[in-house]
Every structure is written in C-alpha cells, then in structure tokens.
Image (cartoon, helix red, strand yellow):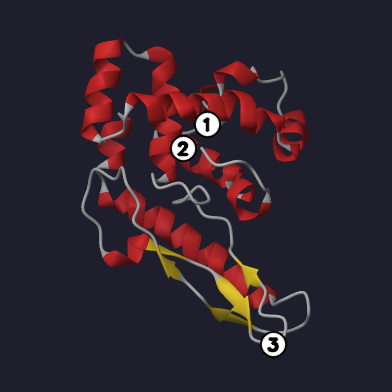
Amino acid sequence: MYAALLADARFHDLLLAVDRDLADACRTEGCACGGRRHMAHYARKPRGRPCRLGPEHDQRFSFCCAVDGCRSRATPPSLRFLARRVYVATIVVLITILQNGVSDARLERLSQVVSVDRRTIARWRRWWRDTFTATPFWRMARAAFLPPLDGTQLPAALIDRFGGDAQDPLVALLRFLGPVPGGVRMPAF
C-alpha cells in the first residue's frame, strides 16, 4: 500500500506544496530583529524516493535575514526532509514502521528497493526508541495522546493515531514531526 504511495509523483507534489506553504509563512513572518527574510534555499541530494521527480523536489527551503549584522537563518519545518538526514522523511518513517511487522525477507526486499542498509534501519529504530523519546519535543507532545503511546513502538504507534486513508495518516505524522527538524536540536542518526 505504501509502496504505491511512495512511487506516486502526486504524493511528492503534495509534500512539496505543503513545504512551500510552510516556507511562505516563515518568510512573511520576518526576522526577530524586524528585518525581511531573503531566500537562501539550498540543494539536497535526497535518497530513497522510488520515483523520478524534478529538481524542485531536491531544494530545501530556507531564508536569511536581510539586515547586515543579523543575517540569521530560518529554515521552516519540512514534510520532505528530516533535518540533515540523507533519506527522505517518508522513507525514514515507513521503513521504521515496517520493521516492526514484516518478515526478514520482506524487509530485505524493501531495503533493496530503496537501497537502505540494514544497519541504517537499525540506527533509525534506535533513534526513534532512544533519542526521539528523550527530546523535550516528545515529552511535551506525547501528553496530547490518550491513551498514552508506547514509546517502543514509534513511529507505528503515532501513525495509528492519525485517521484517513494511506496518505492522510502519513501526511499528518510528517506534519506532527515538522517542529523536530525545524528547531529542536537532536543528535543525527
């Protein structure tokens, strides 16, 4: 089900459109010093997308203050990228979810389709279980879920709480995670 979604260019266009909306809001907000924000987008080389997309999908939206002496950078949340990780956010989330409920053979086939090494997948699992659950973001956000979520089952426990068809819960989960790479400092994985 998710493999078809990942191969659908319209899904990636939706994520790009949401990222553009988030970028527009960040830019119009302006800098804390009162200055305007200028575009300072940068190219990414994301891994893990099973479909071909245009170069606009490889651009990370970012802005810097126009005031000399300030030049502070503002990078809005993104549904396509998780901070500095090289794999797209959907792959990090979905492969980690699938690791909880698939056989070794299916996991091997999936990791070959998107070219993700088993050790990388194991690092992602540890990140969700240990690093993410220790962040101030998660400690605050988990209070919104009743009954409480099992931290050892993340991100599967999160996606189960968001309703809709295959696309809706995934987009909702990526929106939920938006503040994590946008401003919360967390160790890389």
Look at the picture and state if 148 lies above or below 138: above
Residue at 44% in and 69% down: 42
Say which quarter of the image contains residue 167. Answer: top left
Q: Residues within 10 Å of mark 2 (few under 14, many from 20)?
A: many
Q: Are marks 3 and 1 in contact (CB under 8 Å)?
A: no
Q: Nearer the viewer, residue 128 or 57?
A: 128
Q: Position of residue 37 (x, y in %)?
A: 62, 80
The residue under label 1 is which amino acid type? Gly
Q: Residues within 10 Å of mark 3 (few under 14, many from 20)?
A: some
Q: Position of residue 48 (x, y in %)?
A: 31, 42
Left or right relative to 129: residue 165: left
Q: Element at badge 2?
A: helix
Tell me, yes or no, if residue 165 can be seen here. Answer: no
Q: Position of residue 85 (x, y in %)?
A: 46, 46
Q: Position of residue 18 (x, y in %)?
A: 48, 58
Give the number of the disc on residue 17. Answer: none
